[in-house]
Image (cartoon, grey):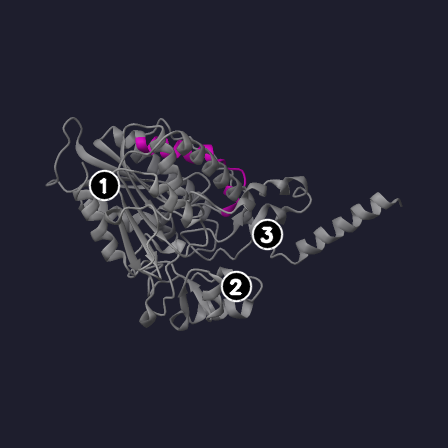
Amino acid sequence: MNQFNSMFLAGLLLLLQACGATPPLGARHQPSGLNTQFNSDQLAFSDYVADSRAMITKVRAGSNVTELEKVVNGNVPFELKPAESCPKGREKPYRRGVLLTHALTDAPYSMHSLASFFQENCFRVMAVLLPGHGTQPGDLLDVTWQEWAKAEAYGTDKLAAEADEIYLAGFSTGGTLSVYQALGDNRVRGLFLFSPALKVTPMASLATVHKIYSWLMPSAKWVSIMPDKAIYRYESFPKNAAAQVYTLIQKVQAQLHKHEVNIPIFTAASQDDTTVYTSATLDFMAHAHHESNKLVLYTADTKKIPPNIPAGNLELVNSIFPEQKILSSAHTSMTLPSEDAYYGIKGAYSNCIHYYPDDIKKYDACNQNPEQDLQGELTEENLKAGTLRRLMYNPNFSTLKISMKKFIDGLP
């Protein structure tokens, strides 16, 4: 056997050994064949919701989830109408409308509380489901960012047919898509961004390298293979998803270098975010010059003022709550209140997947005794403090609503 073949087999053995140390793939890690492309362009929004419901029901019905209706309701796109007493549009049924877009690996469930807020403030509300989401993690293996952009454009079009003024509201990748749509659509009157993904780790640019060898080792297609206990989000994370977000962000940043965003922007972000670079969000807001702009920044140091952002456009909010064992805010904690039934203080779900599979003992303890755990972002300092759940709700949600209401009242 020559030296090249010996080296190749040695490398192959290492790959297979690594594969053996990885949790096994399940049926959920394969594409369903139903949820990779956005094909609802010609549908009325209500029909799009109905078709999505049927798709999610079909895919999720074979799982071990006992409360199928609950699962489906949290993953489908949805719509809300304002009260009859709200101001009417000049030429259309509604004065204002807002499109809500969820985060990567997430679902429309995470936007429900925001939707209720906007409805109460007389907005026509629509929330889309991004292709690849709501069914099973394997549906993210082949999806492209262009399909997500199609869903965003569709929702914007449907909203524009019913409301005079169009606003986009997005969480994380949903925020990126909102900016992308606004940069090419002069119908958009303003943005609401929550932990927007405007920069992620450069390692994401290498997320497609696995294609060289993943035909032999399917687990190599995944950043992480998790139990997927959550019913409104994926815990497993494919490399393709990271690659698509990275490419989308590059497209947005390229456009931002050419065009200023001159519409009102409301942004809420965490200084401790470990998923996206908050520094990119601060830079984005520093270069957005509309006088109505507002940045709500959750931080452990409310005396440290970010540079280049006017004081009148900035609100620093304390993110530490010792009495609640909350060490900081988190990327995942922006859009839901503490009373949320699934992610809140007494919620059914604990985000402990950062311990899986390397520390199963801690993973089990984190899931079994949530009231004893610390909560916050997955920073090195926080993880050293003790057993840590990633924070999934915003203890400042009531004040966030007040800030958003002031922003809305000041819209031109």
* Mark 1: amino acid: Ser
User: Can residue 140 be found in the magenta stretch?
Assistant: yes
Q: Quadrant of the C terminus?
A: top left
Q: Quadrant of residue 325?
A: bottom left
Where's residue 138, x and y in %?
Answer: 53, 45
Residue at which label 1 appears? 292
Callout 3: few (<14), some (14-19), or many (20+) C-alpha neighbours within 10 Å? some
As drawn, which residue projects farthest toward the front?
307
Tell me the SS state at disc 1.
Answer: loop
Residue at which label 2 appears? 355
Where's residue 174, x and y in %?
Answer: 38, 42
Residue at which label 3 appears? 25
User: What is the spatial separation of the Cα atoms under label 3 and label 2, in whole angstroms?
Assistant: 18 Å
Residue 223 lies, with reference to residue 322, above or below; the image says above
Where's residue 344, x and y in %?
Answer: 33, 61
Q: Which of labels 2 and 1 is toward the front?
A: 1
Regarding residue 60, the answer to whether it shows in the image is: yes
* Mark 3: amino acid: Leu
Q: Which of labels 3 and 2 is toward the front?
A: 2
Q: Residue at x 52, y 63 (%)?
A: 355
Cβ–Cβ below 8 Å for labels 1 and 3?
no
Regarding residue 53, the answer to whether it shows in the image is: no
Q: Nearer the viewer, residue 200 or 241?
A: 200
**Which of disc 1 and disc 2 is earlier in sequence?**
1
Q: Which of labels 1 and 3 is toward the front?
A: 1
Tell me the SS state at disc 3.
Answer: loop
Q: Residue at x 48, y 52 (%)?
A: 63
Where's residue 69, x and y in %?
Answer: 36, 51
Q: What segment is highlighted magenta in the picture? A: 137-156
Q: Nearer the viewer, residue 117 or 314?
A: 314
